[in-house]
Image (cartoon, rainbow, N blue to C red):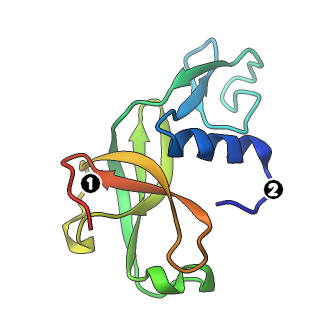
Amino acid sequence: MSGHGDAGYDEFLEALEAGDGYYYACSNGHGMLPPRRVCSHCGDRDLETLPLPETGEIVTHTTVTVPTPAFDDDAPYVTALAAFSPVRLTGIVRGVDPADVDIGDAVMATVEPSETTDDRTITFRPTDGTHD
């Protein structure tokens, strides 16, 4: 989310919001997200910037009914972990009823404001074009 003061992460959010998401890959093929500058798997410092795949797949999810104050107006909402091989993103699923979110669902990643604070948050939308 915006406001945590990490320029590398903010740049990543801006790119994702513009449809130009990316990730870093080391020479051994490990993937990671900004602002990381060193591979957490092997310590490689020679990272390449690669485009984030357009679609990912929900790996796990949970419905939040009792949120933190920063998400009061968003609840209930689904937080999901989605694999955009070889990296994983955590975000809020929108554009589908929370009861209809399933592991294996294909999603696109974007950035949208929180309904509570207007802070930017990673958001997943179904790839079938369904929107709220």
- Residue 22, x across and y down, in percent: 55, 31
Secondary structure of residue under mark 2 = loop
Of labels 2 and 1, the one closer to you: 2
Q: Earlier in the sequence, mark 2 or mark 1?
A: 2
The answer to whether residue 64 is left or right of residue 117 is left
Residue at 74% over, 19% down: 44
Q: Is residue 54 above or below residue 119?
A: above
Q: Is residue 22 above or below residue 111?
A: above
Quick one: 130 or 92, which is closer to the camera? Answer: 130
The answer to whether residue 69 is left or right of residue 88 is right
Quick one: 90 or 5, which is closer to the camera? Answer: 5
Quadrant assignment, res 131: bottom left
The residue where tag 2 is placed is: 5
User: Quick check: marks 2 and 1 in contact, CB under 8 Å?
Assistant: no
What's under tag 2, amino acid-wise?
Gly
Residue at 38% over, 82% down: 76
Residue at 43% over, 83% down: 75
- Real-space Cα distance between discs 2 and 1? 32 Å
What's under tag 1, amino acid-wise?
Ile
| 10 Å crowding of disc 1: few (<14), some (14-19), many (20+) | few
The answer to whether residue 100 is left or right of residue 39 is left
Quick one: 99 or 2, which is closer to the camera? Answer: 2
- Residue 1, x across and y down, in percent: 64, 60
Q: Is residue 22 above or below residue 13?
A: above
Secondary structure of residue under mark 1 = loop
| 10 Å crowding of disc 2: few (<14), some (14-19), many (20+) | few
- Residue 127, x across and y down, in percent: 24, 46
The residue where tag 1 is placed is: 103
The residue lying furthest to the top in this view is 27
Please count the marks in the image: 2
- Residue 115, x across and y down, in percent: 50, 76
